Image (tube, rainbow, N blue to C red):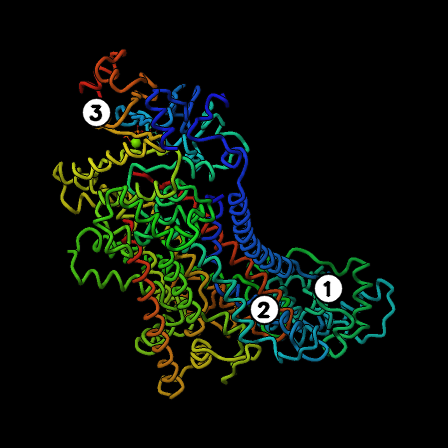
Amino acid sequence: MTDLSSSPTQPAAPENSLLTLNKRTKARNAAERRFKAYGIAAISVGLIMLLVLVTTIVSRGTGAFQQTFVTLNVELLESKLDKSGQRNIEDIKKVTTFGYAPIVKSAMKETVNGLGLQTGLKSKELAGLLSKSAVAQLRAFVLANPEQIGKTVEFRFLAQSRVDGYLKGRVTRESIENDKNISPEQLDLVDALVAAGVIEKSFNLDFILGSDASDQRPEAAGMGVSMMGSLFMMLVVLALALPIGVAASIYLEEFAPKNWMTDVIEVNIANLAAVPSIVYGILGLAVFINYRHLPMSAPLVGGLVLTLMTLPTIIISTRASLKAVPPSIRDAALGVGASKMQSVFHHVLPLAAPGNLTGTIIGLAQALGETAPLLLIGMVGFIASNAPETLSEGLLSPNSAMPAQIYEWAKRADPAFYERAWGGIIILLLFLVTMNTVAVILRRRFERRW
Amino acid sequence: MNTMNMMDKALNTTTTKIAARNVNVYYGDSHAIKDVNVEIDANTVTAFIGPSGCGKSTFLRWINRMNDTIDICRVTGDILLDGEDIYDKRVDPVQLRAQAGLVFQKPNPFPKSIYDNVSYGPRIHGLARNKAEMNEIVEKSLRRAAIWDEVKDRLDAPGTGLSGGQQQRLCIARAIATEPEVLLMDEPCSALDPIATAQVEELIDELRASFSVVIVTHSMQQAARVSQKTAFFHLGNLVEFGPTGQIFTNPEDPRTESYITGRIG
Amino acid sequence: MRSFAKPLLEILAGIPTIVYGLFALLTVGPLLLKLFGQGEDGVFGLNWMSGATSVLTAGVVMGIMLIPFVSSLSDDIINAVPQSLRDGSLGLGATKSETVRQVVLPAALPGIVGAILLAASRAIGETMIVVMGAGAIAKFSANPFESMTTITTRVVSQLTGDTDFASPETLVAFALGLSLFVLTLGLNVLALYIVRKYREQYD
Ligand SMILES: Nc1ncnc2c1ncn2[C@@H]1O[C@H](COP(=O)(O)OP(=O)(O)OP(=O)(O)O)[C@@H](O)[C@H]1O
Ligand SMILES: [Mg+2]
């Protein structure tokens, strides 16, 4: 074959053979490889950063889901808690948390002595191993179960945050040299109590369900109430942004005349989607709080601000999905005598629904993670200790939101709160990644090629 | 070399430039080209005709391995260019494509100036040593593609701003600027007026002296005018292949006859 | 690869800025301080940085934040370059990298510039990262290792807590907010104009 095909016009010179690469091709292939290497390097850098980010979050945050507890047998002395012995709830209520402090101290002492441990610590220092919330926990239990007074009950108290940090490796003997909250002797005792099984680490449901706590008690702080705040804000956003957004897109896409007015509106919507969120916060502060006198820090206001912020996103994606429905569908509906409105609501809208849903979820996810505007309308800086019970309370009483709560923790001085902040990030990201993944899957599944 | 060419023609001895053996092309599950054998001669114009969707473009893309860029595309069989298997592992498609230029069915000028469009190929293949040589190549290619007079005053204007027919000729100029040995043209005259068509046909005839040309066309007259050999494809099969005169006057296959006379297609 | 990487990019672009803010405050800031800080902290003994919050901290983290944003946007734009152009280049015997560099990128360039402008506008309006990473010292310095303030930080510090709506501080914050709005709006209009104009070429 080779002899046959070596045509006289093209002598099969070796440099002309396809089977051997000529010099230039080799050089060009080398350039190609270099270019590819740059690309791979860029991707690797990106991936490494992602990896660093994820590992930082996970390694620093998972600690928040574990907490150190101290298990004690507490004798609920009648002489201290109910002097009259009547079990009259009003009388029992008169005993403040101060009245419970000696009980906790003695329970701690009993336990240490019972284990035969030698320690030079005073009983105050012994009780110092427990969280400051221990007395409140005890009191709440007694008020709920007055019949238990006089008996000995087993309790699981939170350990104070230094003890917790010591067990998690955050606090070391070197780091506490100037710390007045804990002493090396106390840590010695902690070691002994851990060995005895009195102090142990276990899963901390309260971090997920509980409320924030004051500066002194990082061990008791939780995300639960701010999660409720976020939930109520999302309700507001959903209830407002979805109908308004869909109505606006339907009007703009299906009914509005195409003139310069609608053009201006369209350009504006695209621009609003890219306006910094803090500007919406300022707007909300000025309009809803200063002018309309809605309560500060209320999820309702937060929801309104976030609605303003999400609307452009929802409108853009809904319009895109309406646009993607081919005109032939509208023509077909109109052709069999449907009114314009019927054609839109019976035929176009159902076909555009998945796109609309995707846009809504992405918009909600954005709103859920947004912090900056919430700072301005006062959703940080205080402690909402009780979960709201009714809808109106949920909307109007001051609350925080997940990202605002994280910011709040990050600002506090005690490093114990940082762990909470990272843990909060994990919870927040779980929500967001779930929402975004659902959106991506939805879009994949309903993606239609006409 | 030219004299040798002349001699070739005079002696009527042709040599095989491209030989395809048992070629099958699949796009996913659909079988686009079915067991085609064809030999394309050097210094001839070969026309591919056939109804739409029968696999003509696919076959052209196959000759310069453009199908490599389509993930779902799978090919079997051998294709030999000057006796060398172009699907051999050692063959770099980049080098192959420099030798087998392809003019696409739809004009696709780059969003660059007309000059840059034409000089693109010579530049990447290093065919010009200096600016003057490049200018020469650009002018020569544009002249051969019968578009020089229309664009000579605006070589810096974007190629995308030309009319459809002008774009098509620009793409032809771009392809011949690299001096390929084989020129594959997919419906190069589909958007051209009769005058430009005549000019391109002239070009094709001229190119035959140095290249072998494969042209896909839907115009029977054009095939008859410019080609020496004609291949008729139908539903992915090569139905008939032979000298143009014979195909058009005395086809062997009834399908060829009905297509040529306008009954199928 | 694409079908997997693209949603991943989008999800990454959806990570809220508080995450990056925390990253700046608790990870990057202390790390930079360790590298460039003074005294025992400084690994190189450079003594360039006095605190963990600095312009550099915020800048680095913001750069990381914008990677998925810019690449997702640019990907859309590069994807919009018609396949026929790539085919045209490859058909002439160009390698893939030559095609990308000389045909695809120039064709997509206006769109990519638009994407970068959008990213810039996001960076200017970005609040959480600077509030948590850049500190709040109002001074003018060319040293990126010092902490400085931005419009957004000022707005946050003036308007958080109890707000007295008549006080000059509040009015200043509103004025700052307005300037921010105008600034980013200008950038956005420009960016969207470029992106759009470019898109029309191929529609
Ligand atoms: N990228 C692709 N993916 C899947 N199928 C394809 C692709 N390109 C072509 N095909 C299929 O392969 C078959 C042959 O297509 P081809 O483009 O070769 O036809 P053609 O003969 O050039 O038609 P026309 O005269 O209309 O240009 C057709 O059925 C087409 O649908
Ligand atoms: Mg074709």
Residue B13, above or below A420: above
Residue for badge 2: A89
On the image, which quarter does residue A410 sit in?
bottom right
In the image, residue A92 lies at what x, y percent?
62, 71
Nearest to viewer (mark 2 / mark 3): 3
Residue A76 image point, x, y percent: 71, 66
How many residues crowd around disc 2 within 10 Å: few (fewer than 14), some, or many (20 or more)?
some
Relative to A199, C197 lies left or right = left
Report the residue marked by disc 3: B220
What chain does badge 2 belong to?
Answer: A
Residue B79: % across, % down: 45, 25
- Where does the image place residue A426, in percent across and percent down from the top left? 56, 58
* Mark 1 burial class by Cα count in 10 Å: few <14, some 14-19, many 20+: few
**C106 or A272: which is nearer to us?**
C106
Instruction: Identify the mark at residue A169; answer none if there is no mark.
Output: 1
Q: Dot 2: what SS? A: helix
Q: Quadrant of ligand 1?
A: top left
The chain under label 3 reads: B
Dot 2 or dot 1: first in sequence order is 2
Which chain contains the residue that carries disc 1?
Answer: A
Q: Element under label 3? A: helix
Q: Are marks 2 and 1 on the same chain?
A: yes
Is the same chain shared between marks 2 and 3?
Answer: no
- The amino acid marked with disc number 1 is Gly
- Element carrying mark 1: loop
Q: Amino acid at mark 3?
A: Met
Measured in 3D between alpha carbons, the distance from the residue under mark 2 to the one under mark 3, in whole angstroms, is 107 Å
Residue at the image position 25 percent from the left and 28 percent from the top: B226
Nearer the observer: mark 2 or 1; the answer is 1
Residue type at tag 2: Ile
